[in-house]
Image: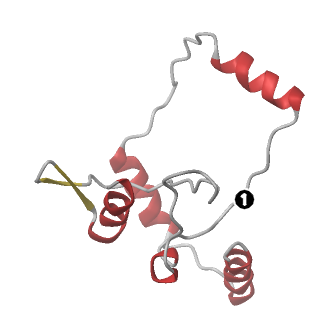
Amino acid sequence: KTQSSLLEAMEERQVTAGGVTHPMAKPFFVLATQNPIELEGTYPLPEAQLDRFMFKIELGYLSEEEEVQVVASTTQTHDRALAHPLTGEDILEFQRIARQVPAAEAVIQYAVRLVHATRP
């Protein structure tokens, strides 16, 4: 069910739960993880669905020192207020502005090669 909901959000920009369909507010993005195949309940996506993902990043395990830092930083409270939180409208405006910036052909080709290098 999780996998089909994820694909519905990506494809149709909506999610359905309990028979009720909810449109996704703009902007939104989907961040997904893929568990190792050996974990129970994990199924690889077919090639036709893999192309919906922009890039793939493989992460290894943290070193012991890094893991200690993660545990230490997530087992205490931090009262940090954002000085300038962005709204969805702010992000949409930034996207509109970014689309107006010209990109050289060589930069576009490099970006595409970089993304292709992350795919299986």
Q: Residue at x 68, y 80 (%)?
A: 116
- Give, as a three-letter code, the residue at label 1: Glu
Residue projecting furthest to the left: 19
Residue 92 in which image quadrant:
bottom left
Residue 107 pos. (x, y %): 72, 80
Q: Quadrant of the N terminus?
A: bottom left
Mark 1 surroundings: few (<14), some (14-19) or many (≥20) residues within 10 A: few
- In the picture of the structure, the residue carrying the numbered disc 1 is 58
Residue 21 pos. (x, y %): 14, 55
Q: Residue at x 70, y 19 (%)?
A: 73
Residue 20 pos. (x, y %): 11, 51
Nearest the viewer among 41 and 90 is 41
Above/below status of 66 relative to 44: above
Nearest the viewer among 93 and 112 is 112
Q: Residue at x 39, y 60 (%)?
A: 3
Taking 29 as reference, is 62 left or right? right
Q: What is the secondary structure assignment of the residue under circle 1?
A: loop
